[in-house]
Amino acid sequence: MDLVSAVVPAEPPAHPKDGLTEPVLRIADVVKSYAGRTVVHGVSIEISAGECFGLLGPNGAGKTTTILTACGLLGPDSGEVTLGAERLPVALAAARRQIGYVPQDIALYDDLSGRENLIFFGNLYGLRRAALRKRIDEALDFVGLGDRGKDRVGTYSGGMKRRLNIAAALLHEPAVLILDEPTVGVDPQSRNAILEGLHELRVSGIAILYTSHYMDEIERICNRIGIMDEGRILAEGTREQLMKTLGAEVERVRLSCRGDASRAAAHLTALSCVVGVEVVDGALEVAVRGAAGSLPEVLTALARDGVDVTALSVDTPDLESVFLHLTGKALRDV
Ligand SMILES: Nc1ncnc2c1ncn2[C@@H]1O[C@H](COP(=O)(O)OP(=O)(O)O)[C@@H](O)[C@H]1O
Ligand SMILES: [Mg+2]
C-alpha cells in the first residue's frame, strides 16, 4: 500500500444498506463486571451490512452480557459501542431505532393476539395506523404467522412465540438485528423457518448478530464467527479461517475390521504417524496426524497383521474441534 492510500480514508458508504463494508455495529473493547466479577473481558466485534456474525460459546461465556451492552441496555465498565454514526449511550434513542433485539427470554403478552402484540411494539417505535398495519402484515408473513395473527399468543407453541418475537423486532426495519439464542426450546420446523428467514434478511442487507451454543446453526447462517469462552473471544473469522487454526491436527479414524484387532493395535502404536489407538467394540479407533497422508501406512500395517478392514470413516474436524483446540473442553459438555 502506498503512503497516500494509507493515510487517506476510503469514502464512507452513503448508507449501511448499500452493501458497502463500513461496519454498522462496532463493539470496541467492552469490559463488563457484575458485583466485582468481570464476565466480559475486552470484547470487540464489528459487523457490516449484509453480514451475519455468530457468537458461539457455552452457557456463561458472556454472550448475553455482550449483547445487552450492544443494545444499550447495559452500560459497559469500559469500551464503547457505536451504531452507524451514533455512539452509545450518547445517542441511545437514535441508535435504538437502528436495532431490532430478540431477547433470550420471550417477551410477549399471552392474553393479547399476535397482531395486538405487534401493535403494542410498533407503537413503542412510533409506528401508527396504515404504516403500522402494513409492517405488521409483512412481518407476520415473513415469520410464517400470516394466518395466526388473530389468535391469542397464549395458544401459540414455543416456536411460534419466538417467531412473533422476531416479527416484533423487525417492525421498524432496523439496520441491525440482534438475536440471543433464538432457537432454544423451539420445534425443528420453527427452527428451520427462523434460520431461513435470517438468511433472507442478511441477503436483503441487514447486519445480524446471532448468539448460540449450537455449532451447526452458527455454521449454517453466519459468514463470520467469534468463539467465546469465559468472557473472551478466543478466535474470530470465517469458518475456513477458524478451521485453519487447527493446522495439521490430529484426526480420528474408525476402522471396522475382521481379525485380531488388539494385536494389530499394538503394532499400529509403533507407527510415527499414529498418536493413539483404542479398540472400541472390536473396531479400531486410531488417532493420526493428517489422515490423508497416514492412512496408506495404517492400512498396510493392518494387512501385514492379516486384519481385513470392512469399513472406514474419518471424523471431519468442525467448529467443535476448534473449540476443543482453543479451550481444552468440548462445547457440548460445558
Ligand atoms: N445480572 C447478573 N448478575 C450477576 N452475574 C451475572 C448476571 N448476568 C450474568 N451473570 C454472570 O455472568 C456470566 C456471563 O453470563 P451471560 O452473559 O448470561 O453468558 P451467556 O449468555 O454466554 O450464557 C455468567 O457467569 C453469569 O452467571
Ligand atoms: Mg445467554
Image (cartoon, rainbow, N blue to C red):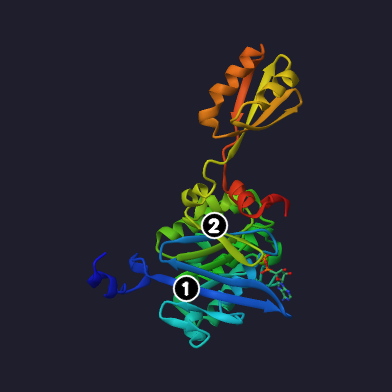
Q: Compared to 255, does 171 lie above or below?
A: below
Density class for disc 2 (Cα within 10 Å; few <14, some 14-19, many ≥20) is some
The residue depicted at 65 percent of the width and 30 percent of the height is 286
Q: Position of residue 316 (x, y in %)?
A: 57, 38
Tell me where residue 175 appears, x and y as whole percent.
44, 71
Picture residue at 43% right of the left edge, 72% below the top = 24
Write down which quadrant ligand 1 falls in: bottom right
**Residue furthest toward the bottom?**
90
- The image position of residue 86, as x and y in percent, is 44, 82
Which of the two discs, 1 and 2, labels the residue nearer the N terminus?
1
Q: Which mark is residue 144?
A: 2
Nearest the camera: 277 or 185?
A: 277
Q: Is residue 14 above or below residue 160?
A: below
Q: The disc labelled 2 sits on which kind of residue?
A: Gly
Query: 263 and 16: which one is in front?
Result: 263
Secondary structure category for the residue under label 1: strand
Q: Given the image, on which type of amino acid does mark 1 rest?
A: Arg
Q: Eyeballing the image, is 120 above or below 242?
A: below
| Quadrant of res 278 | top right
